[in-house]
């Protein structure tokens, strides 16, 4: 699964849209996020770790790495 589908799925489970997610990210950072920018970053896999942490925060989740 690619990043955009994964984030969409997680957001939907939490009752949030990508638009709401972009708005949250803009309100909780010093950057301007829009639905278009967020979607482009997710599709192109150019999203930063700090942005993924912010997404996790918005979804009330933790971003963790686990051993296989």
Image (cartoon, grey):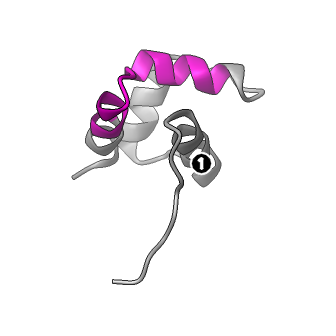
Q: Is residue 24 one of those drawn in magenta?
A: yes
| Residue found at the very far left of the displayed protein | 1
Label 1 neighbour load within 10 Å: few <14, some 14-19, many 20+? some
**Location of residue 44 by image quarter:** top left
Q: Is residue 20 left or right of residue 15?
A: right
Q: Which residues are magenta?
A: 8-26
Residue 24 in the image: x percent, y percent? 59, 22
Residue 53 in the image: x percent, y percent? 59, 48
Q: Residue at x 49, y 24 (%)?
A: 21
Question: As displayed, is residue 55 above or below residue 35?
Answer: below
Quarter in which the C terminus is drawn = bottom left
Secondary element at tag 1? helix
Q: Residue at x 69, y 19 (%)?
A: 27
Residue 38 or residue 6, whichever sits in front: 6
| Residue found at the very far bottom of the displayed protein | 68
| Residue found at the very far right of the displayed protein | 30
Q: Is residue 23 one of those drawn in magenta?
A: yes
| Magenta stretch: helix, strand or loop mostly | helix
Residue 49 in the image: x percent, y percent? 59, 53
Question: As displayed, is residue 65 above or below residue 17?
Answer: below
Q: Is residue 54 left or right of residue 1?
A: right
Residue 13 in the image: x percent, y percent? 30, 34
Q: Residue at x 44, y 16 (%)?
A: 19
Q: Is residue 27 left or right of residue 19?
A: right
In the rendered image, which residue does mark 1 sit on? Answer: 53
């Amino acid at each position: 699964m690619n990043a955009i589908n994964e984030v969409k799925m997680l957001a939907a489970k939490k009752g949030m849209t990508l638009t709401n997610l972009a708005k949250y990210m803009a309100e909780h950072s010093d950057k301007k996020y829009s639905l278009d920018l967020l979607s482009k970053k997710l599709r192109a896999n150019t999203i930063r770790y700090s942005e993924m942490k912010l997404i996790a925060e918005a979804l009330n989740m933790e971003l963790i790495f686990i051993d296989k």
